[in-house]
Amino acid sequence: MSSIEDFKEILKHSEPLSKYSYFKIGGPAQFFLEPRNVDELQAVVQCCVENEIPVRVFGGGSNILIKDAGVQGAVIRINGDAFATVQIDGTSVTAGAGTLLSNLVSQTVKSALAGLEGLVGIPGTVGGALHGNTGGQNGDIGQYATSVTVLTARAEIFVRTADELSFSYRESSINELAILEATFELKQDDSEEVTNRMKKNWIMKKASQPLTHQSAGCIFKNPRGMHAGALIEQAGLKGTRIGGAEISDRHANYIVNDENATTENVLDLINLAQNTVSEKFGVELELEIELW
């Protein structure tokens, strides 16, 4: 039986996860590992299975809120060149799970491929984006996915084809331990038009979202037919602070960290928003971010 200590070249003990989170908050991981390739990732997961060590996997850390106490077990970061390849063959695009979403968007736009330009400005990696079906007003990433290669909690690798995939608002049927890569089918379009659409989307996001602050993107899913940010603003909570965390005065569905916030501060604001919106409007706000 292998030991987690066998992976000392890529292993860190009690590593602060705040270093890797977009929120820049969160406690340490008991074991933190950054496998250098798929084989090493598979071996790490197999070792954790054998030793009954709980495993969590993340990429860009843009859609997670990590508790101040940290995470017991192994936390694996999908990062590095081996997980960030992008291959374009006609209108078919295959990207590694560790590819920055911004890089995938820019490469497809440069190739005059339409579909993903509406995702400009969204942080994180392809794996995380697919898991949560990231998107915006102009569509979601899942609608273009034709196959996804996954790693199970038992360290098995297999490919899920289009008929095995389903996507809905900020959700996907991809519930395995990790995504390794995905293939997307896009459409050839006029290069200038695709580029202009991307620029327009970027300008609109920059004008309405607090992109220069530490946050995790939208905190809540939009209730059907409504906007979470508008409900929170109408509840009078825009700009509300608890400790070092604040409900953004630019977009109320963002909570920002002014560099000394704790996860507890953020959770208190989340609870305040949920309770106030429920009392005033009878609407239950559902988290879009994942709480670790």
Image (tube, rainbow, N blue to C red):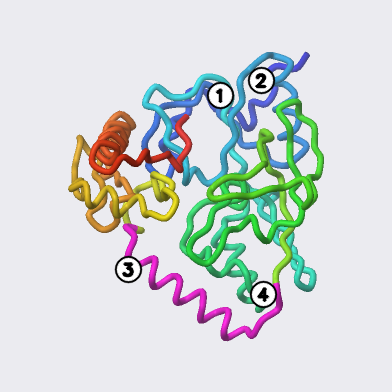
Q: Extreme front residue here?
A: 282
> Marks 2 and 4: CB-CB under 8 Å?
no
In-front residue for pair 50/193: 193
Which one is in front in this view, the residue at disc 2 or the one at disc 4? Answer: 4
Which region is colored magenta? 187-210
Circle 4 residue: 113
Residue wearing tag 3: 207
The residue that label 2 is drawn on is 4
Q: Residues within 10 Å of mark 2 (few under 14, many from 20)?
A: some
Q: Residue at x 81, y 40 (%)?
A: 158
Element class at badge 1: strand
Distance (Cα) linking label 2 and label 4: 43 Å
Q: Could you say where residue 93 lies in the image, as x and y percent from the top left? A: 73, 64
Please, what is the three-letter code of the amino acid marked with disc 4?
Answer: Leu
Residue 175, how many percent across, how many down? 66, 36
At a point 46% along the width and 62% down the height, the residue shown is 121
Left or right of 11 in this view: 158: right
Of labels 2 and 4, earlier in sequence is 2
User: What's the CA distance linking mark 4 and mark 1?
Assistant: 40 Å
Q: Is residue 195 magenta?
A: yes
Lower sequence index among marks 3 and 1: 1
Query: Disc number at residue 31?
Result: 1
Distance of label 2 from label 3 (alpha carbons): 46 Å
Q: Is residue 246 left or right of residue 187?
A: left
**Relative side of 61 to 39, left or right:** left
Q: Main secondary structure of the magenta part?
A: helix
Foreground residue among 244 and 230: 230
Q: Are marks 1 and 2 in contact (CB under 8 Å)?
A: yes
